[in-house]
Amino acid sequence: MDVSEGFQKKIVQALEAAFQAIGLCKLEMESNQIEEMIQSHVGDTRLDIIEASMGLPDIAGEVSVEKPLPISAKKMVMIEAIERVPNLEDVYRLKRYAEILAPDYVFLVTKERFAGQLRGFLEEHPHILQFLIKSTTTVSGAREITVGHLDENGELAIDTEISPGDPFNPKKMWS
């Protein structure tokens, strides 16, 4: 997407700070670094599919979980940044990325919140903000897309009306 570097940097700072609740997070904005990170997690085939069909996510990275107990495997994080009121197309583009790459954490970070009829629809249909993982076909095999925006202090404010989960809760690492 066409997102300013300044907005992306603010998102990186906000998410890296928020992830301190569970460990160390390193996020990347440069395409070559995003490619390397994705390749190390999911291999060439999925990376090739993403690049050929829709390009790379805006921001991606890894979390080393240290709390409440350290685990050796790093968790993949993927972020789509939107500098306007988001629409349903933004959600489904992010879902396509997520279902192909199966990251552990997925964020849609916007400058403005969902509005009007679409907001009401997402509140009534929370499954829209979920994506399937691996070869499962049930909602129980789904992960959440966390929707949020940057507040006036540059911190991530999760839109709890449509994203009720807390991705920074140390217990999330077990889900």
Image (tube, rainbow, N blue to C red):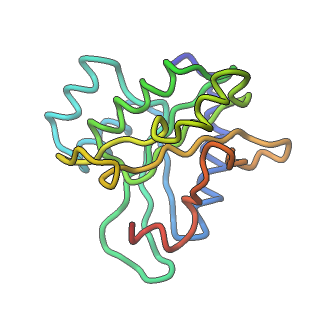
- Judged left or right of residue 118, residue 112 is right
**Which quadrant would residue 47 be assigned to in this image?**
top left
**Which quadrant would residue 70 be assigned to in this image?**
bottom left
Eyeballing the image, is 111 above or below 16? above
Eyeballing the image, is 55 above or below 157? above
> What x and y, as percent, mark residue 164?
61, 53
* Residue furthest to the right: 152
- Location of the C terminus (image quadrant): bottom left
Nearest the viewer among 36 and 15 is 15
Q: How many marks?
A: 0
> What x and y, as percent, mark residue 105?
45, 51
Residue at coordinates 27% horizontally, 26% vertically from top-left?
A: 50
* Residue furthest to the front: 124
> What x and y, as percent, mark residue 162?
62, 42
Eyeballing the image, is 156 above or below 122? below
**Which quadrant would residue 2 be assigned to in this image?**
top right
- Judged left or right of residue 80, residue 82 is right
Eyeballing the image, is 112 above or below 67? above
Residue at coordinates 35% horizontally, 62% vertically from top-left?
A: 74
- Judged left or right of residue 77, residue 134 is left
Nearest the viewer among 70 and 92 is 92
Nearest the viewer among 152 and 174 is 174
* Residue furthest to the left: 45
Residue at coordinates 60% horizontally, 41% vertically from top-left?
A: 147
* Residue furthest to the bottom: 69
- Judged left or right of residue 84, residue 132 is left
> What x and y, as percent, mark residue 65?
44, 70
